[in-house]
Amino acid sequence: MPLTTVADHRNRVAELIGRMPVEQLPLADCLGLVLAEDVVAPISLPPFDNSAMDGYAVRAADIAGAPVELPVADDIPAGKTDLKHLAAGSAHRIMTGAPVPPGADAVIQVELTDGGTATVRVNSAVAEGANIRRAADDVRAGDTVLTAGTVLRPAQLGLLAALGFAALPVRRRPRVLVLSTGSELVEPGHRLLPGQIYESNGLMLATAVREAGGEAKLLRFVPDDVVEFHAALAPHLRSVDVIMTSGGVSAGAYEVVKDAFTGRGVEFTRVAMQPGGPQGAGRYGGVAVVTLPGNPVSAQVSFEVFVRPALLASMGHTVVERQMAQAALTSAITSPLGKTQFRRGAYDPESNQVVTPVGGPGSHLLSALALSNCLIEVPEDATELPAGSTVTVRMLM
């Protein structure tokens, strides 16, 4: 069977997952999501003239001959709505953010006064308009403040909260069922028997989904039995967008994922990459399915190359790839001809942009992945890269 290219399988996974629907979500749930529509300001910011300082609202003409003493006719804390007109020859004590009363055309900061409450001695003159934030100085009602496609970060959410929005139209997070198969798997914290291993792929992949912005439900310890496999999936088919499995897709016996999905809408292939050759993708029960290999490094590298970009694209992100950089190898590496190799590496941008391979190419070397901050991409036509060779690195953080 001819090998599938990395690019072709990546496109296949992206097409399967597709775009998530648009939903109105509460503002607090929109961090990292993408606006589906332009947002028009319903009000101006600031919505009224307000004080930029703690001080006194005055008429600039009344303090032009400072020092002067004025009676304090009113107090204006932030949030006051019943404002009195400022009479000529008087002052209103005012707090930062409070509305400027009608009749006032300046605010004198408290530091330039004696801080009086019945009367105030003003020690310096200020110009008309001093220390007043004008209405609509930031945003004018009717302005388009954010456009469709904007990624919602804290600053954007703060702006929309200030404009009074309680919910926003966004592409929702993809809901991913992460399925961990294998009769040999044991939950961390329990005693291992001979031939058993602790389950790690499920947790690793579920947290990778969440890091990418998706919602993950982890279904652990599905036995290597086709009937039980289908039974375990059935309750979740109506509530998830993607089923992502790890393991059970190679050519040997007891490959439960392959056995369960073959002939049911999921196609299996070998991708021209190392690690991560055995892959599968398709639909089962109307749900997108992505099957990853079982070795932990293969599973995580496959997620990075195929699934993470597709999840981001499904939410409307236009930047879906990790940051890439060019770096010089500190030591030589070898790679199989005809396969794109993803080696773990430590990239140091401060030391003349060099990258050091971490561990070997083995797909079981999880500690090397944990100590890496990038993947070194070796092209499929390269078999040996000597120290000093320039390579592309895909940042992992």
Image (cartoon, rainbow, N blue to C red):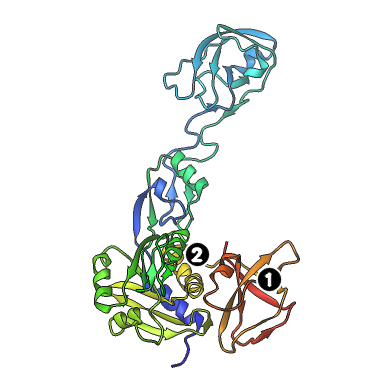
- Specify the amino acid type for callout 1: Thr
Considering every residue shown, the one lying at the far front of the view is: 194
Left or right of 74? Residue 242 is left
Q: Quadrant of residue 15?
A: bottom left
| Residue placed most toward the observer, 28 or 49 | 28
Helix, strand or loop at label 2? It is: loop
> What residue sits 28% from the left and 74% below the top?
229
Q: CA distance from mark 2 to mark 1?
A: 30 Å
Residue 72 in the image: state x and y as whole percent.
Answer: 55, 9
Q: Are marks 2 and 1 in contact (CB under 8 Å)?
A: no
Can residue 18 be spotted in the picture?
no
The residue that label 1 is drawn on is 356
| Residue placed most toward the observer, 298 or 148 | 298
| Residue placed most toward the observer, 245 or 243 | 245
Tell me the quadrant of the picture where the C terminus can be found. Answer: bottom right
> What residue sits 58% from the left and 17% below the top?
56
- Specify the amino acid type for callout 2: Thr
Q: How many marks?
A: 2
Left or right of 40? Residue 120 is right
Left or right of 236? Residue 36 is right
- Of the image marks 2 and 1, the number of the one nearer the N terminus: 2
Classify 81 as above or below 153.
Answer: above
Q: Dot 2: few (<14), some (14–19), or many (≥20) neighbours within 10 Å?
A: some
Can residue 128 be spotted in the picture?
yes
> What residue sits 65% from the left and 14% below the top?
113
Helix, strand or loop at label 1? It is: strand
Q: Dot 1: few (<14), some (14–19), or many (≥20) neighbours within 10 Å?
A: many
